[in-house]
Image (cartoon, grey):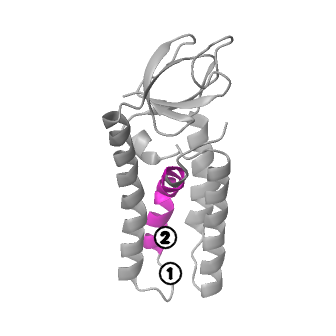
């Protein structure tokens, strides 16, 4: 399924990188004044999360609701662990101290952005975890005529468990990401 809201997806991916910018600011970069690094990092942490909040608010205001029925549901807490270990730990160990190392750091970030974009992992945001939301992948029900019935979709919810066959009213954040509020 072709994902829409390209700019929203990109900004949501950047929001998932917020911890990296915090780590980068704490560690510092040789040759870049702390003041500029702090301003840049604050912008990269705050702006995407404000955009995410705005996207959720807009979906509610525009009544971008869908009634979707769950098929097989997979819990994806393991995605958060993969996120932490594959992304945060290597960058925690990195400390760019030269222009060349900084360029490598930026290239690695661009690679991660590409992977998150390409694999539709734009829902990976620690803000959801901070506000006690869980993330599930929901597979279509067989023979369902509901929207997205041919494709899996991501559900962001406060529920700890989502039973198969449950009818949910959700807000569309993108074509494959829905939030139950």
Q: Which residue is drawn at 67% across and 46% down?
A: 119
Q: Do the residues labelled 2 and 1 touch (CB within 8 Å)?
A: yes
Q: Give the residue at x 45% y 47%.
A: 126
Badge 2 element: helix
Q: Residue furthest bottom?
A: 31
Where does the magenta region start and end? 8-27
Q: How many marks?
A: 2
- Tell whether 160 sits left or right of 61: right
Residue, disc 1: 29
Q: In this view, does 109 lie to the left or right of 123?
A: right
Q: How crowded is mark 2: few (under 14 residues within 10 Å), some or many (20 or more)?
A: many
- Kindly identify the residue that appears in the image at 42 percent across and 41 percent down: 128
Q: What percent of the width, then of the height, locates residue 90? A: 63, 62
Q: In which quarter of the image is the C terminus?
A: top left
Viewer-closest of 110 and 63: 63
Q: In this view, does 19 lie to the left or right of 87?
A: left
Q: How crowded is mark 1: few (under 14 residues within 10 Å), some or many (20 or more)?
A: some
Q: How far apart are marks 2 and 1 (CA)?
A: 7 Å
Nearer-the-camera pick, 140 or 27: 140
Q: Mark 2 points at which residue?
A: 24
- Where does the image place residue 27, in percent across and percent down from the top left? 47, 73
Q: Which of marks 2 and 1 is nearer the N terminus?
A: 2
């Amino acid at each position: 399924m072709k994902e829409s809201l390209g700019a929203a997806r990109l900004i949501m991916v950047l929001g998932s990188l917020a911890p990296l910018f915090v780590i980068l600011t704490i560690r510092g970069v040789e040759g870049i004044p702390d003041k500029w690094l702090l301003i840049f990092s604050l912008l990269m942490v705050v702006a995407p999360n404000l955009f995410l909040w705005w996207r959720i608010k807009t979906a509610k205001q525009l009544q971008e609701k869908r009634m979707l029925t769950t098929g097989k549901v997979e819990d994806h807490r393991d995605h958060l662990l993969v996120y932490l270990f594959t992304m945060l730990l290597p960058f925690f160990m990195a400390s760019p101290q030269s222009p060349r190392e900084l360029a490598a750091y930026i290239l690695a970030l661009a690679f991660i952005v590409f992977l998150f974009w390409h694999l539709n992992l734009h829902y990976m945001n620690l803000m959801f975890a901070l506000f006690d939301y869980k993330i599930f992948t929901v597979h279509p029900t067989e023979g369902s005529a509901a929207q997205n019935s041919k494709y899996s979709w991501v559900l962001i919810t406060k529920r700890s468990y989502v039973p198969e066959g449950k009818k949910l009213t959700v807000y569309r954040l993108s074509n494959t990401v829905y939030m139950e509020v």
